[in-house]
Image (cartoon, rainbow, N blue to C red):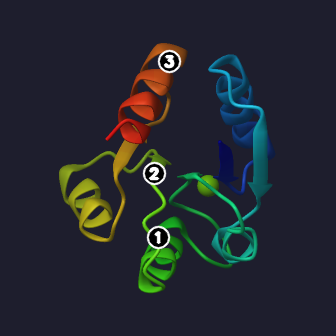
């Protein structure tokens, strides 16, 4: 399973990638923002994306991915944890979300439940 990690923070991408590796994922592609993410969708089975990013934010990125009819599972990893924002993300095509900061246990649980649906 090939995973795309989209986040403008190098540290956050490192944390997410390390969590993915611990969970057994070996094929990980990283992108700096939504625009870079769109250029790296080839063969991707799961997307983990940040919300706040320069150039193209996570919500716009999700809308763009879904606009082309893609059904790749998407998990939003964000500090935007309020109900309105979460609702907006889900309505835009996000399958699940993880609020930062997260524990490795929560991370794995959310990822596994997303890909098993
Ligand atoms: Mg960010």
User: For mark 3, what is the residue?
Assistant: 103
Q: Position of residue 78 (x, y in %)?
A: 47, 47
Q: Are marks 1 and 2 in contact (CB under 8 Å)?
A: yes
Q: Nearer the viewer, mark 3 or mark 1?
A: 1
Q: CA distance from mark 2 to mark 3?
A: 15 Å
Residue depicted at x 66% and y 75%:
38
Residue depicted at x 76% and y 62%:
32
Q: Quadrant of ligand 1?
A: bottom right
Q: CA distance from mark 3 to mark 1?
A: 24 Å
Q: Position of residue 61 (x, y in %)?
A: 53, 74
Give residue 76's mark.
2
53 relative to 100, above or below: below
Report the label total: 3
Residue density around tag 2, few if under 14, some if 14–19, many if 20 or more, within 10 Å: many
Q: Nearer the viewer, residue 73 or 36?
A: 73
Q: Is mark 1 within 8 Å of ligand 1?
A: no
Q: Position of residue 41 (x, y in %)?
A: 68, 68
User: For mark 1, what is the residue?
Assistant: 62
48 relative to 62, above or below: above
Q: Which badge, 1 or 2, is on the more N-terminal residue? A: 1
- Judged from the image, the secondary structure of the residue bearing numbered disc 2 is strand
In the rendered structure, the answer to whether residue 12 lies left or right of residue 48 reads: right
Q: Which badge, 3 or 1, is on the more N-terminal residue? A: 1
Q: Which badge, 2 or 3, is on the more N-terminal residue? A: 2
């Amino acid at each position: 399973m090939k995973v795309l990690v989209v986040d403008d923070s190098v540290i956050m991408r490192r944390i997410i990638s390390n969590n993915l590796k611990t969970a057994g994922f070996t094929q990980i592609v990283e992108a700096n923002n939504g625009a870079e993410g769109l250029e790296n969708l080839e063969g991707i089975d799961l997307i983990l994306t940040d919300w706040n990013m320069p150039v193209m934010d996570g919500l716009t990125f999700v809308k763009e991915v879904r606009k082309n009819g893609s059904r790749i599972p998407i998990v939003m990893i964000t500090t935007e944890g309020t109900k309105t924002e979460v609702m907006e993300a889900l309505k835009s095509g996000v399958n699940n979300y993880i609020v930062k900061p997260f524990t490795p246990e929560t991370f794995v649980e959310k990822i596994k439940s997303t890909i098993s649906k």
